[in-house]
Image (cartoon, rainbow, N blue to C red):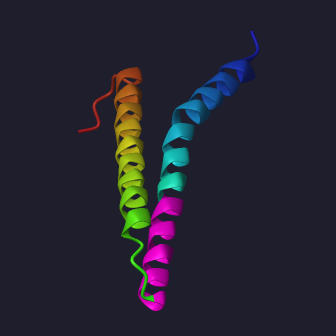
Amino acid sequence: MDPNASVTGLARAIQLSVAPVFLLTGITALLVAGVVAVLFISAVAALDLAVIVVPVFVLAMVFLILGLVFFLLEVQLAIRQNPQRYY
């Protein structure tokens, strides 16, 4: 058996477990930036854009919470895979 195969498999597993966390974090950052931009435009143009701001902000918070939940699940998985105690 090729020793690099196990390293490649481990790297692939890590990549697959981390991808959702980074994806949701990136989406959250874009949504928050969009909220800030719309708030700035509404302040400058004296428009009431709350209809846009509120749902986008709520969606950003949902993605942030999902990203944190995925991160916690990933940490639990890593702890179960390594039986050593670090605390």
Q: Is residue 3 above or below residue 1?
A: below
In the rendered image, which quarter contains the N terminus?
A: top right
- Residue visible at 40% across and 36% down? 70
Name the residue furthest left.
87
- Residue visible at 51% across and 68% down? 34
Pick whichever, 75 or 57, lies toward us.
57
Q: Is residue 30 above or below residue 43?
A: above
- Residue 60 occupies quadrant: bottom left
Q: Is residue 40 above or below residue 84?
A: below
Residue 40 highlighted magenta (yes or no): yes
* Residue 10 percent across, percent down from the top left: 60, 26
Name the residue furthest right.
2
Q: Is residue 10 above or below residue 64?
A: above
Q: Main secondary structure of the magenta part?
A: helix
* Residue 25 percent across, percent down from the top left: 48, 52
Residue 70 highlighted magenta (yes or no): no
Total numbered labels: 0
Pick whichever, 61 or 41, lies toward us.
41
User: Would residue 81 appear left or right of 11 to someone viewing this image?
Assistant: left
* Residue 33 percent across, percent down from the top left: 50, 69
* Residue 72 percent across, percent down from the top left: 34, 37
- Residue visible at 52% across and 32% down? 17
Magenta span:
29-45
In the rendered image, which quarter contains the C terminus?
A: top left
Pick whichever, 34 or 68, lies toward us.
34
